[in-house]
Amino acid sequence: MTEMTAHTVSRDSFSRRIWRKTWQGVGVKLGFAWVGILVFMGVFAPFLANSMPLLMSKAGVISAPVLAYLTAEDVLVLVMLVLALVLVWLPLSGAKRVLLFVVGTLVAAVMANAFVKPPAVKIYDEFRTPAYTEVDWRIMPLIPYAPTDYLRDYPEHGLEAPLAATERFHLMGTEENGADVFSRMIHASRIALSIGLIATGIAMVIGVILGGLMGYFSGVVDMIGMRLVEIFEAIPTLFLLLTFVAFFGRSLYMMMIIIGVTSWSGYARYIRAEFLKLRKQEYVQAAVASGLPLSSILFRHMLPNGVAPLLVAVSFGVASAILAEATLSFLGLGLVGEPSWGQMLDQAVKSSTFNWWMAVFPGGAIFLTVFAYNLIGEAFRDAIDPKLSRNAGVGS
């Protein structure tokens, strides 16, 4: 009796199959969990750590003081989260989702900067006066201190170890100016995420386009492209950042652009090497013979089959961008008035004694963030690499 084995054809898209394989590991779940925590803290930072009430009632009038002080950046990240969640559930292709997200983000950025006008001066001491404390009821954030609230209305403020203050509760202690470390940790996650993702995104887009053209055409295009790669690889990113900071001041957007523009060469090398192997494959030749446009051949047919090494490089790129910003802040050349993990690390050794809480908490956050991105990159590589997939199938 001959047994017939029924084979079912999977109707899942390529991205769905890759995502299902990626999600099988324990490490990638831990990595996404930590990144998810950072995203949650970065998006909802004004509602998690602030000196002003989220909601309060005074003489029967209900108000939300925190909403009046939201900045254009606060509104923009909230809109971006809502837009991302909506696009995930819409039945659209990946390219259309990315395009709609970029367009929606640009429109939201223009509108937020045009219409969101918070008070220019924030006096946090006022929110501890009877006007805000002697009320019917009020709901305070989880951390009732803003990242730039230096507690000047208290007689003693400055560096304090965790739980050392008698009049206040600081789970992670305070920094040299008296600001709550936990609050600054939460708000600093936004800077770490934005500079890591945006700078790496800029570098990846440039690297994929130039590397794909170099690998597909080879010859003169490849030779000119490789000389360009060597020029950019010779540029010291950290010293270039220091130079721009010295001449043009400190700007987060400038850091993102410089890191992105100077770090694309590694991605271009990976894509070039993969495309040199793939351009002679039968499915690529069939796509060329069918008259498909160059963009479709490069990015729809070749890129998904050559993206595996790039994902690991991207994970290290995000980590490198975060470390570059932390290094600048550690050297005292980071953003002014904005909390940063590197800036807090610098305060660990500023005084005559070693302030362990200023090293453990921001240093641990940097380590966990870099480690999480590496776990995610390795999981994507294992899921996409066809050799690993075949080996896994033979072993089972």
Image (spheres, grey):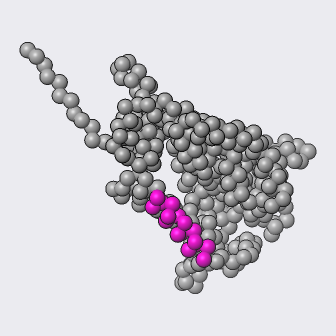
Q: Main secondary structure of the magenta part?
A: helix
**Is residue 316 among the parts visible in the rendering?**
no
Relative horizontal placement of residue 387, taking residue 157 as reference (left or right):
left
Residue at screen point 44% across, 47% down: 294
- On-image quarter of the C terminus: top left
Total marks drawn?
0
Tell me which segment is drawn in magenta. Answer: 99-114
Residue 360: x %, y % from top left: 73, 41
**Is residue 1 among the parts visible in the rendering?**
yes
Residue at screen point 54% across, 80% down: 62
Relative horizontal placement of residue 96, taking residue 168 as reference (left or right):
left
User: Which of 29 and 294 lies nearest the eye of the viewer?
Assistant: 294
Image vertical order of residue 62 relative to residue 104, above or below: below
Residue 9: x %, y % from top left: 24, 35
Relative horizontal placement of residue 13, taking residue 345 as reference (left or right):
left
Does the segment drawn in magenta span residue 239?
A: no
Image vertical order of residue 118 relative to residue 369, above or below: below
The residue furthest top is 1
Does the segment drawn in magenta span residue 110?
A: yes
Residue 87: x %, y % from top left: 41, 58
User: Which of 175 and 247 lies nearest the eye of the viewer?
Assistant: 247
The residue furthest right is 352
Relative horizontal placement of residue 343, taking residue 187 as reference (left or right):
right
- On-image quarter of the N terminus: top left
Image vertical order of residue 168 relative to residue 326, above or below: below
Q: Quadrant of residue 4?
A: top left
User: Which of 337 and 128 lies nearest the eye of the viewer?
Assistant: 337
Residue at screen point 88% across, 43% down: 353
User: Which of 191 and 248 lies nearest the eye of the viewer?
Assistant: 248
